[in-house]
Amino acid sequence: MSDTIVLRAAVPGDEALVARFVRDLAEYEHLTHEVLGTEADYRRALFGTPQRLWALFACRGDEPVGFALWFYTFSTFAGRPSLYVEDVFVRPEQRGRGIGRMIFRHLAGLALQEGCARMEWTVLDWNAPAIGFYRAIGARPRDEWTIQRLDGEALRAFAQ
């Protein structure tokens, strides 16, 4: 198999592959109990109207070895869109070969092409290898901010 990595956009029919990578990422993060997304959910988000989600795969030959999912938000302070990286995952046996850097560089290029003011993502505080990688590419933490979440029963109750 070639050592060359090629990035390719997700196309209709890739929903099962997206779902598999999401499960693999959740397993790595010890969060499989939170995975509820289905292939149908990913199909609607990636290929429906309006499109809500974008995805790409990093492939070594015909084998997908990494992926990324992202969407666009809007920064009212900057007055421009932002690219929000929801998920990036490179299979553990493929790490250390520049695949993550290739994915992030591609996403940074998309952010600029789309006129985004910034690119953002979250990382679990225990994930030292990922944090080290993010610092190496120039990302910086926003320690003064915390993520707030309203979901499940709390979301339903509050909406009433």
Image (cartoon, helix red, strand yellow):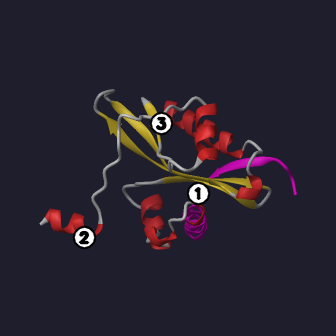
Residue 18 position in % (x across, y down): 57, 64
Residue 137 position in % (x across, y down): 62, 32
Residue stretch in magenta: 1-26
Residue 118, image quadrant: top left
Q: Is residue 155 left or right of residue 110?
A: left
- Quadrant occupied by the N terminus: bottom right
Q: Is residue 56 left or right of residue 70?
A: right
Residue 37, visible in the rendered structure: no
Q: Marks 3/1: CA distance?
A: 20 Å
Say what secondary structure mark 1 lies in: loop
Q: What residue is drawn where x is 31% and y is 55%? A: 149
| Residue of label 2 | 153
Q: Nearer the viewer, residue 129 or 103?
A: 129
Q: Amino acid at mark 3?
A: Met
| Residue of label 3 | 119
Q: Amino acid at mark 1?
A: Ala
Q: What residue is drawn where x is 56% and y is 40%? A: 107
Instruction: Please report contact status of discs 2 and 3: CB closer than 8 Å, yes or no.
Output: no
Residue 141's label in the rendered image is: none
Instruction: Please report contact status of discs 3 and 1: CB closer than 8 Å, yes or no.
Output: no
- Between disc 2 and disc 1, whose residue precedes? 1
| Residue of label 1 | 10
